[in-house]
Amino acid sequence: MARPVLGRVSGRTSTPSRVTHLDRDRSLVEAARRDPERFEALYRRYLAQVYSYAYYELGDHHRAEDATERTFLAALTGLDRFEERARPADGEGASTFRVWLFQIARNTVANERRAARRHPTTDLSAAAIVPDPLDVEAGVALRDEAAAAWRAVGRLPADRRRALVLRFVEEMSTAEIAGVLGRSEGAVRVLIHRSLRAVGRELRGEPR
Amino acid sequence: MTFRSRDAAPADALLTDRYLEALLAGDRRGDAPADSALDPAVREASTRLRRDLVRVHPSFRFEERLAARLAEAARSMRLAAAAGAEGHAATVPFPLGELSRRMAEEDEQTPGFPRPLLIGGAITSAALSLAGAAFVAWRRTHPPARGRSPMARAIRAVHPGRRPASRIGLV
């Protein structure tokens, strides 16, 4: 895990100086704001994470690529609107830019899902061979055990599945997931705990 | 769900969270020390998901294609910023080749037809309008003395015999 970046912020008048937890990506974000072509560093750093998230959510490489492309284009053009709100509670190595980026990704994936529902591109005969969006078994070719684990995750409600993907695939902290999902940290902890209990019981063959 | 289990959920969730912190900070295939109160089903699911939910990387071709697209968009944004534009603009290539071809065709069809040049005329017109407006504003604050304006002097110089209408009893 990356080390936190600490900066000293001193007040202009009588406010005592204090140590503030800064966004891990602050220097890269500032460089990209000065020169948009420097956005590439942020893109390279987070490409696999955003793509993984989209892929686990959509279960299709092409749709995941579309969602990834839209996410990064939106982030590039909207970088001026990004506000750094790092807090000590965000944890070591936390990046509010990453939270902001995943908020965009989450909205983009949701739009992608809606568009897919409005404009289905396959007929019923073809649908039989198209993998279910939640069933990434065919696409990833995981081992049997991995496929069983993913099936158990895939049967969870969307918010629980999303929380587990962010926690285990993206290795986000509870605070970051709370930022992405727009929930409190306590709610996210309970969400993950209950999701894991349900998955564990299914893997053991017990009723959820 | 009972009231007891509802109350216990945040405490159990905190326990799970601590375990996950240790688990995710360690090696992907290893386990982490866990509190004895941790639900065994939670622990088993955590180690399985830690091992099996892997990050997926897109193809190299997609990565480079999107990088090129982002670079193009970034260049457009920089050009727009340099031009002082607000917001975001995309450069649209001007179809100069097509335009030149069509102009050449028109020239062949109508030889010697003068092509009007609008740009200089528009600028001149705008400048004259501004100068005219400034003169009118100045004149409103500086009314000319009766009969002593340059125009009146010019008329008298051209027509020395002409007298004002008031002098010949018309008004």
Image (cartoon, coloured by chain):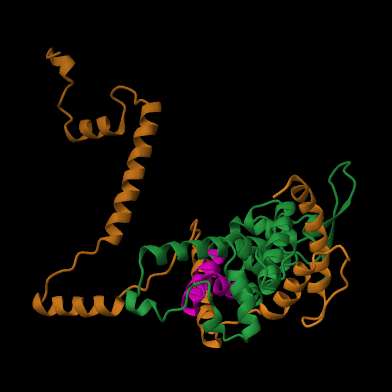
Please tell me which residue is depicted at 69% across the width and 58% down the height of the picture: A191
What is chain B's hue in the picture?
Answer: orange
- Identify the main secondary structure in magenta: helix
Q: Nearer the viewer, residue B119 or A123?
A: A123
Q: Residue at x 39, y 33 (%)?
A: B138
Please tell me in which quadrant of the rendered image residue A41 appears.
Answer: bottom right
Q: Height in image: A26 above or below B162?
A: below
The image position of residue A127, as x and y in percent, is 38, 76
Left or right of A172 in this view: B79: left
Foreground of the two, B119 or B163: B119
Q: Colour of chain A?
A: green
Q: Quadrant of the C terminus of chain A?
A: bottom right
**Residue A203 x %, y %:** 67, 74
Residue at (76, 51) in percent of width and height = B5
Q: Quadrant of residue B59?
A: bottom right
* Nearest to the observer: residue B153 or residue B128: B128
Instruction: State which quadrant residue A82 falls in.
Output: bottom right
Position of B69 with respect to B169 (left or right) is right
